[in-house]
Image (cartoon, rainbow, N blue to C red):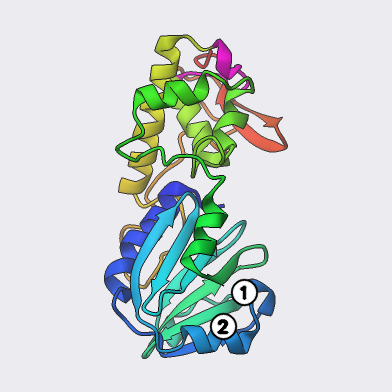
């Protein structure tokens, strides 16, 4: 599932391409991927300019000229591709927005969705989501204040979208490895130095993820040189040598998630 760096990459790449462009055609191949009847969706989206694209947590919001919004959550297996028909990946497309002879394809939306909502409804969707970890206002003090009342394990806490927005299974492993903290450590047991280390690692890993275009293997468009240059250091590397201490990376299920870590240098 795409996390904060992947969705931020999509946003930054799409904004200069389709920002200010009008949607010339709407195609819905799977009605469950949207939240209103196809005719209503098409009538409110067709010929609308995309004013701006915003990211919040793991969501993208496409703000339309008429004030409506398209809320995208890719969930597990979802992705996008922008290009001409002949460049389209050989995958089932659930929703297609056209911009002349170029199209934005929403692929793999088995669980994901593109919902048509008002700005007020968007705010309602986001009311229980925690702060953005890379926001300027998210200081170390803010982080310490949030974490001091938490009693769960570190992995589970980082995954909780009501605590901090945008971190998922992959980057939580990367952050905890970088901070040299075990995923099952209790949040309330961390000392001041460990909390500061966790905060700094979260900032570093997420920013690096964005700079390197996330982990996605598939490009957003033909010739895309940015997407997918982030290489996981610990996640999905069970049995490989830790890059810091050369002990073996292990995998353990925590909160029903496959979690990867080094038992030797994470404490």
Give the vertical position of 41 relative to 191 (above or below).
Answer: below
Sort mark 1 into few (<14), some (14-19) or many (20+) by Cα contacts within 10 Å. many
Q: Residue at x 33, y 75 (%)?
A: 18
Q: Residue at x 40, y 37 (%)?
A: 133
SS at circle 1: loop
What is the x, y in percent for residue 188?
57, 14
Residue 150 as seen in the image, left or right of residue 84: right
Q: Residue at x 50, y 37 (%)?
A: 164
Res 234 seen here? no
First along the sequence among labels 2 and 1: 1
Question: What residue sits right under mark 2 in the picture?
Answer: 41
What is the x, y in percent for residue 194?
44, 14
Residue 33 as seen in the image, left or right of residue 227: right
Q: What range of the chain is rendered magenta?
A: 180-189
- The quarter holding residue 224 reads bottom left
Residue reaching furthest front? 120
Give the vertical position of 184 relative to 57 (above or below).
Answer: above
Give the vertical position of 56 relative to 176 (above or below).
Answer: below
Sort mark 2 into few (<14), some (14-19) or many (20+) by Cα contacts within 10 Å. some
What is the x, y in percent for residue 260?
59, 31
Question: What residue sits right under mark 1 in the picture?
Answer: 34
SS at circle 2: helix
- The quarter holding residue 78 reads bottom right
The kind of secondary structure the magenta stretch mainly shows is loop
Q: Is residue 187 magenta?
A: yes
Disc number for residue 47: none
The reply to whether the C-beta atoms of the residues labelled 2 and 1 are less than 8 Å apart is yes
In depth, the one of 136 and 186 nearer the eye is 136
What is the x, y in percent for residue 236?
57, 39
In depth, the one of 103 and 44 nearer the eye is 44
Q: Residue at x 52, y 34 (%)?
A: 172
């Amino acid at each position: 599932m795409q996390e904060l760096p992947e969705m931020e990459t999509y946003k930054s790449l799409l904004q200069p391409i389709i920002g200010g462009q009008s949607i010339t055609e709407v195609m819905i191949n799977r009605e469950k991927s949207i939240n209103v009847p196809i005719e209503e969706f098409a009538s409110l989206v067709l010929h609308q300019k995309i004013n701006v694209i915003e990211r919040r947590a793991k969501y993208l919001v496409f703000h339309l000229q008429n004030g409506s919004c398209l809320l995208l959550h890719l969930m597990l297996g979802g992705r996008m591709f922008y290009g001409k028909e002949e460049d389209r990946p050989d995958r089932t497309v659930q929703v297609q927005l056209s911009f002349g002879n170029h199209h934005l394809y929403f692929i793999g939306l088995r669980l994901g969705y593109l919902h048509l909502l008002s700005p007020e409804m968007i705010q309602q969707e986001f009311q229980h989501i925690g702060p953005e970890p890379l926001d300027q206002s998210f200081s170390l003090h803010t982080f310490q204040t949030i974490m001091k009342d938490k009693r769960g394990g570190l992995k589970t806490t980082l995954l909780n979208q009501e605590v901090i927005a945008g971190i998922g299974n992959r980057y939580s492993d990367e952050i905890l490895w970088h901070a040299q903290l075990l995923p099952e450590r209790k949040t309330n047991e961390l000392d001041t130095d460990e909390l500061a280390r966790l905060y700094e690692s979260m900032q570093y890993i997420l920013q690096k993820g964005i700079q390197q275009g996330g982990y996605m293997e598939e490009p957003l468009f033909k010739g895309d040189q940015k997407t997918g240059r982030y290489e996981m250091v610990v996640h999905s590397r069970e049995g490989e040598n830790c890059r810091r201490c050369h002990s073996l990376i292990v995998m353990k299920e925590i909160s029903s998630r496959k979690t990867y870590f080094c038992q030797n240098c994470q404490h």
